[in-house]
Amino acid sequence: MITAELKKAAEIAVLRCMGVKAGESVLIVVDTPQRAFGPLLAAPCLAVGAEPLILEMTPRESHGEEPPEVVARAMLGADVILMPTSKSLSHTAARLAATQAGARIASLPAITPEVMGRTLVADYEEIERRNERLLGILAGKSRVRLSSPAGTDLTFSIEGRTFRADGGINHRPGDFANLPAGEVYVAPVEGTAAGILIVDGSMAGVGLLADPVELVVSDGAVVEIRGGEEAEELERLITPFGWDARNVAELGIGTNETATISGNVLEDEKVLGTCHVALGDNSTFGGRVSVASHLDGVVRGPALEVDGGVILEGGVPVGW
């Protein structure tokens, strides 16, 4: 059922976040489980005189798997692209090519009506300001240590890598973000991550965790996954994609105060004061690993140090 709250959230996504204008072509890529979001997002496009096209594909097997070639070609011709699909297209060559061609893109992987209604009404101007403050603090840094009450103790290099921000405002050609938005993220230098990562919030492909998943990391990759049934499920998810799917691909810092840990990683990784670490592909945001898998794991209450400076302490922002 399309409620007034959902209609308002769709209007915010289309008009405020994407800045859709009369005469623009808007491609809405959905898959079968998410087809209801097509007409929902098309309606505000039509209201302002834009030209929406809803393109439905079969669901992908994994986050980061490429869309069909016909979808990839259509993406190259659109002014604006919205992607409410059940598996994320964010970390795909098709998305990157469309970004480089100038499309303004928002990915909404596995979004639900509840998440959409709760989070798309965020104060995007404040998220942008928060992101900019954090980017200023992190610029030019080289070494990260992430720890947590659950037992995370992970270090890696970010030397030469650039932090990027996802603030939700995509008004310039080539802008790209998730919706809901609210994170600053970077690709760690491959081969440098080492230690223990305890994922105790949620894990992409698994959901809200009943038991923490312990990841043993050496030389930049996960060499062992420990825990119960959810750890076994993560092992099953990444094994078909080989060693590259174990790459420590991303560090993200949540900056959205309206987000809560709900089991939907699209929202969970944006929660203010959390960190997330992704495994697999990082080729679309400054890394060198290209694989059809990108899975984020959320860490609760983290401490984050960058070149010895404290960024988060117990999940509380320090100085930003």
Image: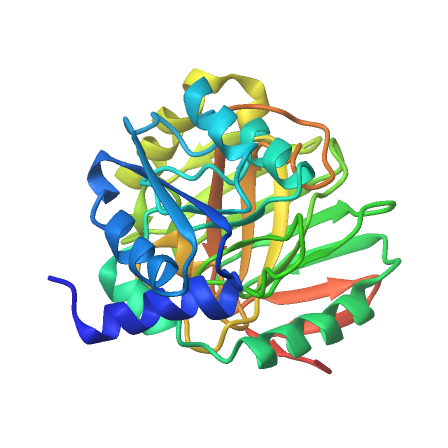
Q: Looking at the picture, how far across and down is residue 223, in whole percent?
A: 56, 28
Q: Is residue 133 left or right of residue 211?
A: right
Q: Is residue 141 left or right of residue 167?
A: right
Horizontal and vertical percent for residue 249? 62, 38
Which one is nearer the viewer's eye here, 48 or 196? 48
The residue at the point 62 percent across, 38 percent down is 248
Q: State whether residue 228 appears in this view.
A: no
As drawn, 118 above or below 217: below
| Residue 238 visible here | yes
In the image, taking residue 144 as reference, residue 166 lies left or right, namely left
Q: How is the image coloured?
A: rainbow
Left or right: residue 150 versus residue 87 is right
- Residue shown at 74%/31% (left/top)? 191
In the rendered image, the vertical position of residue 202 relative to residue 237, given as above or below: below
The x, y position of residue 189, in whole percent, is: 77, 38
Q: Nearer the viewer, residue 219 or 25?
A: 25
Residue 100 lies, in percent from the top left, at 69, 37
Out of 69 and 125, give the one closest to the viewer: 69
Disc tally is: 0
Query: Furthest-left residue in view?
Result: 1
> Where's the C terminus, which quadrant?
bottom right
Q: Identify the residue at image location x=55%, y=29%.
A: 94
- Residue 6 in the image: above or below residue 154: below
Q: Where's the N terminus, which quadrant?
A: bottom left
Corner quadrant of residue 76: top right
